Amino acid sequence: MNRALLPAALLAALLPACGAAPAHAALSLCNRTSYILYTATAALKGQKGEASGWTRLVPGDCATARKERLTGARYLVHARSSLAYSGPARAWGGAIPLCVKDGNFALPETSPANCAAEETFALGFAPLDTKGRSDWTMNFDENPPWHSLRDAQLAGVKRLLAAAGEKPGPVSAAPDKATGTALAAFRKRMHFTSQAGNTELFNALETEALKTSAPAGYTVCNDTAQQLSVALGWKHVKGATSRGWWTVAPGACARAITTALTGDAIYLLAQHKDGKLVAGGDTRFCTAAPAFEIHGANDCAGRGYGAAGFARTGTRGRAGYIAHITQTGILK
């Protein structure tokens, strides 16, 4: 490929980046990093407030996080990188803990000590200095920062192409032959039409990368259109343990185990809120109706528990595993 023509070819393939925040937005967030980010914001007035999320931002994009005009409230923000990237998750936040949920949420803020009781967990938020203005735009940056949203977009495409199994050039803001070839190969693999743009590209890149990159621990992704209740079981030298329930919203992922895996298998049970089975198997573990952690898998009924068959997911040799649950069970 003619190197002199490559920048124009790559830019045409990517389509224009979002160069400005949405018009008439009260609080806009712009992603000037090379990672897909999921962002949450909060507005606090005295001891009361609310938090909401997650707003998805692809590299080089901007979105409205809060539509209401900014007032005298205290505004805070947190962002974390997509699970599509290998290695530890990246987070942009601060030292103020607030309760959040996996999947889209809008929550009245309570004491972080109550997060677990409300099926939420705490993350550190950073305060925003909006200079007293009714509209504000914030950029998320890396260190060192990219110079523009366009630079972040191209670097982000390269990073995701590599995570999805292609072979682009080094992560940078400079177009190159290897990245042009990798991008063309990926578009062909995904059977993109000529009209497919950035939305289709980043969605497909994230989906493909999630199939191969797993963060440390055990993550469950809900690829169905309904909310799921998930329980896990595992065996160890002292017997067996089962734990549940994690609530996973449609299209969301939840990290059920956050430390590196060490065993040969994790056993998974997923069902709709009405109890209809979505994913299960032949290995029996004890369960209970409310949140539970049960040690031992024998004589469940005699100990006052229920029992269910869990599906085996092989984790031998893996520090991290992502289980994708579809309408027909666990994606193989």
Image (cartoon, rainbow, N blue to C red):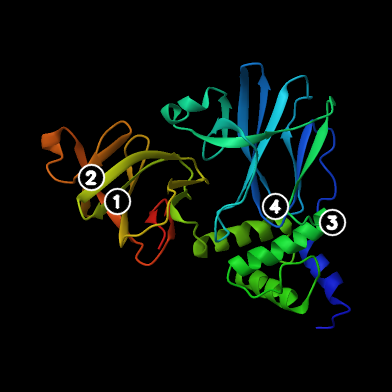
Residue, disc 3: 147
Question: What quarter of the picture does the N terminus occupy?
Answer: bottom right
- The numbered mark, 4 or 3, whose residue comes first in the sequence reads 4
Sequence-wise first label, 2 or 4: 4
Q: Position of residue 232 (x, y in %)?
A: 32, 47
In front of the other: label 3 or label 2?
A: 3
Q: Residues within 10 Å of mark 2 (few under 14, many from 20)?
A: some
Q: Earlier in the sequence, mark 3 or mark 2?
A: 3
Task: Say which residue label 1 marks.
Answer: 280
Residue at image point 82% right, 58% down: 150
| Residue 75 horizontal side relative to residue 293, left or right | right
- What's the CA distance linking mark 3 and mark 1? 49 Å
The residues bearing labels 4 and 1 have C-alpha atoms spaced at a distance of 34 Å
Image position of 73 with respect to 76: above or below: above
Mark 4 to mark 3 CA distance (whole Å): 16 Å
Q: Separation of disc 2 and disc 4 at Cα?
A: 40 Å
Question: Dot 4: few (<14), some (14–19), or many (≥20) neighbours within 10 Å?
Answer: many
